[in-house]
Image: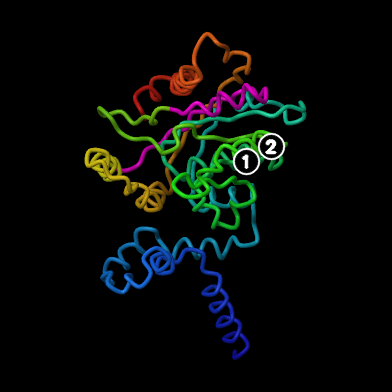
Amino acid sequence: MSESIEKETSQATDRAADKIIDIEKVLRSKMGDKVKFLPRMVVAWLKRMVHEDEVNDFLWKSRDKVGTEWLAECVRYLDMHVTIEGEENLPDKNDGRFYTFVSNHPLGGQDGVCLGSIIGKHYDGRFRYLVNDLLMFLPGLKPVCIGINKTGRQGRNFPQMVESGFQSDNHMLMFPAGLNSRKTGGIIHDLPWKKTFITKSVEYQRDVVPIYFSGRNSERFYRIAKWQRRLGLKVNLAMLFLVDEMYRNVHKDFRIVIGKPIPWQTFDKSRTPMEWAKFVEDRVYEQAGPAGLRGE
């Protein structure tokens, strides 16, 4: 009995020491001594919003997994019910070529995890994401990520980081909108896609594989995003709610439609890179059929 108690105590101590998500630590790093003036109820609310205990519990239990295996564990944990259409359009992993996989970004978390598990499984883990560098704190995700902090020093190195990804022997998985989808006029749709995936795919002769991912966040999320835009706030308040949105989307059904690869030669001088990015963005929503065009 005493040995069992000692073992449990030791495990609890290890969990506390290995705590990955620590809101109080983040606040201290950002606010310094001023953090003491922050009401405890605000700190408690932040912890609930990012599901600090639940996330840390999952990270502890999945600590022995990394890369594709960890992503697949996330899909199981979130109990995602996924239907894949067009899986035969994924290029042969042994054809000796590298591809750029691009998708709409309706959720901001689960969609990236799920697509990473699918691409990673098909290509034996040989893919990389371009992600916000905050996600680099997740040990299981770090091996398949190229971290980006567009607001800090790392932002100046963004071109070099993209370059290293396309120069590598890995497929690239990208969400060209940058941020997850917003709701406008009753339709959930990505923000305009950026052109980087076009210019780099042409430069490195990578065909582009368009992917549609169904799903939506809560009306609360879209209201917050709308008011953030109207008020011209530079702080991305909506992002603060993404973990909570992820937990709201547990046990739900998702539809993935994988389109046929678009040859890199398609993106010629007849249109600008931005126009070609819009062309691929439209292709993604069109291949989902009426549901995609309705933002479902």
| Tags 2 and 1 touching, CB below 8 Å | yes
User: Where residue 3 is drawn, which disc sits there?
Assistant: none
> What residue does disc 1 label?
128
Q: What stretch is highlighted in magenta?
A: 193-218
Q: Earlier in the sequence, mark 2 or mark 1?
A: 1
Give the camera-side residue of 195 and 293. Answer: 195
Give the x, y percent position of residue 42: 28, 66
Disc tally is 2
Give the x, y percent position of residue 185: 25, 27
The furthest residue to the top: 270
Q: Residues within 10 Å of mark 1 (few under 14, many from 20)?
A: many
Viewport quadrant of the N terminus? bottom right
* Residue 91 against residue 110 in the figure, above or below: above
Give the camera-side residue of 225 and 83. Answer: 225
User: What's the CA distance linking mark 2 and mark 1?
Assistant: 6 Å
Any magenta on residue 215?
yes
Which corner quadrant of the image does residue 11 belong to?
bottom right
The residue under label 2 is which amino acid type?
A: Asn
The residue under label 1 is which amino acid type?
A: Arg
Q: Is mark 1 on a helix, strand or loop?
A: strand
Q: How crowded is mark 2: few (under 14 residues within 10 Å), some or many (20 or more)?
A: some
Residue that appears at 49% across and 22% down:
277
* Residue 37 against residue 91 in the figure, above or below: below
* Residue 48 against residue 200 in the figure, above or below: below
The furthest residue to the bottom: 2
